[in-house]
Image (cartoon, rainbow, N blue to C red):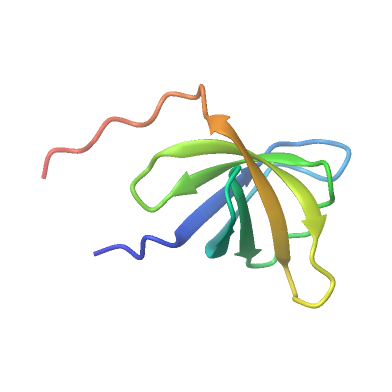
Amino acid sequence: MADPRAVTAHVGASDHGPAAAYAGRIVALEGGGGLMRLRLDGAALTAGQECELEMHDGARFGVMVLEVLPDAAHEYRMKLLGKSNRPEPPLSAS
């Protein structure tokens, strides 16, 4: 069974760099309002940058980086913007 905290952040090409995907995990959900802390392996995101999170089950959500956390390597505070408009890939028949 997949870890329900596992995510992949899909970052589009921008002034911050080329398009990339970073594996990571949800560290904590923070209060209400769709705030969360994420740790993304090897990412170098900046405050205000938007990306798309793919959850362990394939669901995708838009998020925005609110803060790069100074005391943790590659850890970010993010705000959920809503379900992605991008169509999800079809489930494979196994």
Residue 31 position, x and y percent, is: 59, 55
The quadrant holding residue 2 is bottom left
> Above or below — where is 13 with respect to 71?
above
Which residue shows up at 20% across the image and 38% down it? 92
Horizontally, residue 58 falls left or right of residue 39, namely: left
Residue 68 position, x and y percent, is: 81, 60
Which residue shows up at 43% across the image and 49% down it? 55
The quadrant holding residue 58 is top left
Which residue shows up at 35% across the image and 65% down it? 3
Which residue shows up at 52% across the image and 28% down it? 84
> Above or below — where is 66 with respect to 24?
above
> Above or below — where is 28 with respect to 73?
above
Horizontally, residue 43 falls left or right of residue 10, namely: right
Q: Residue furthest front?
A: 32
Horizontally, residue 85 falls left or right of residue 47, namely: left
Residue 35 position, x and y percent, is: 63, 50
Q: Residue furthest right?
A: 15
Total numbered badges shown on the rendered structure: 0
> Above or below — where is 36 with respect to 69?
above
Q: Quarter holding the N terminus?
A: bottom left
Residue 37 position, x and y percent, is: 63, 61
The quadrant holding residue 94 is top left
Q: Residue furthest left?
A: 94
